[in-house]
Image (cartoon, grey):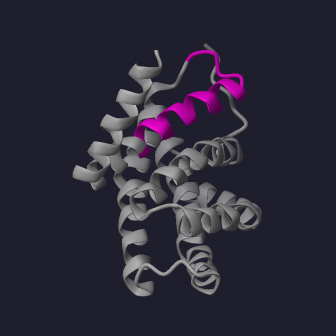
Amino acid sequence: MGSIAKKGINNYVKQLQQHPLRTKVITAGVLSGISDIVSQKLTGIRKIQLRRLLLRAIFSGAYLGPFGHFFHIGLEKIFRGKRDSKTVAKKVLIEQLTASPLNNLLFLIYYGYVVEGRPWVHVRAKVRKDFPSVQYTSWTFWPAVGWISHQFLPLHFRVIFRFFVAFCWGIFLNLRARTLVLTKA
């Protein structure tokens, strides 16, 4: 069994090196889908809502995967691959002041408007209510993730590492963004 897992990991790393964007897009979509399944089960939904699951996977694959890929390449170009503490702190600060609020805001809007299909006026009110606490929680959690990824991981593994951490973060956002109405199977 160990050799099968090792072979799978080696094949994944090979794909990541040969086709980094495609691999990150697929990984983001798959992990987001699994995260949504867990979220649905935690909220008491008995029958998986396939439409919701697919829309979450599409958002992650179409937006978060490419965004993370190019954002981290851009940071590396700006800071020329430096990993000293001062540079890592700057990278984390840039992430937390730009990518973090943008990604959280877009997720809350997308979730309410597209996934739940709620009217814009309700989505806007919910975003105004929930965004500050979501962002505050993000700022208490993600800087440590950013520090670890910039300090210790090579560029091609940073986004993948974050996707695995985002698996849990996605569950949090899902629970935060969902409506109180639960579909019964």
Q: Is residue 89 magenta?
A: no
Magenta segment main secondary structure: helix
Residue situated in front as seen by the camera: 2 or 24: 2
* 133 is higher (above) or lower (below) than 43: below
For the point 66% across and 24% down, the residue is: 41
Q: Position of residue 172 (x, y in %)?
A: 69, 45
For the point 64% across and 33% down, the residue is: 39
For the point 74% across and 62% down, the residue is: 129
Residue situated in front as seen by the camera: 144 or 7: 7
Q: Is residue 119 visible?
A: no
Q: Is residue 46 magenta?
A: yes
142 sits left or right of 113 in the view: right
Quarter location, residue 125? bottom right
Residue situated in front as seen by the camera: 15 or 132: 15
113 sits left or right of 93 in the view: left
* 131 is higher (above) or lower (below) than 2: below
Q: Is residue 14 visible?
A: yes
Residue situated in front as seen by the camera: 127 or 31: 31
Image mark count: 0
* 122 is higher (above) or lower (below) than 31: below
Magenta residue span: 28-47
Q: Position of residue 98 (x, y in %)?
A: 55, 77
Q: Position of residue 1 (x, y in %)?
A: 46, 15
- Check the image and name the residue furthest to the left: 18
Query: Image quadrant for the C terminus?
Result: top right
For the point 70% across and 64% down, the residue is: 144
124 sits left or right of 20 in the view: right
- Check the image and name the residue furthest to the front: 3
Quarter location, residue 86? bottom right
80 sits left or right of 139 in the view: left
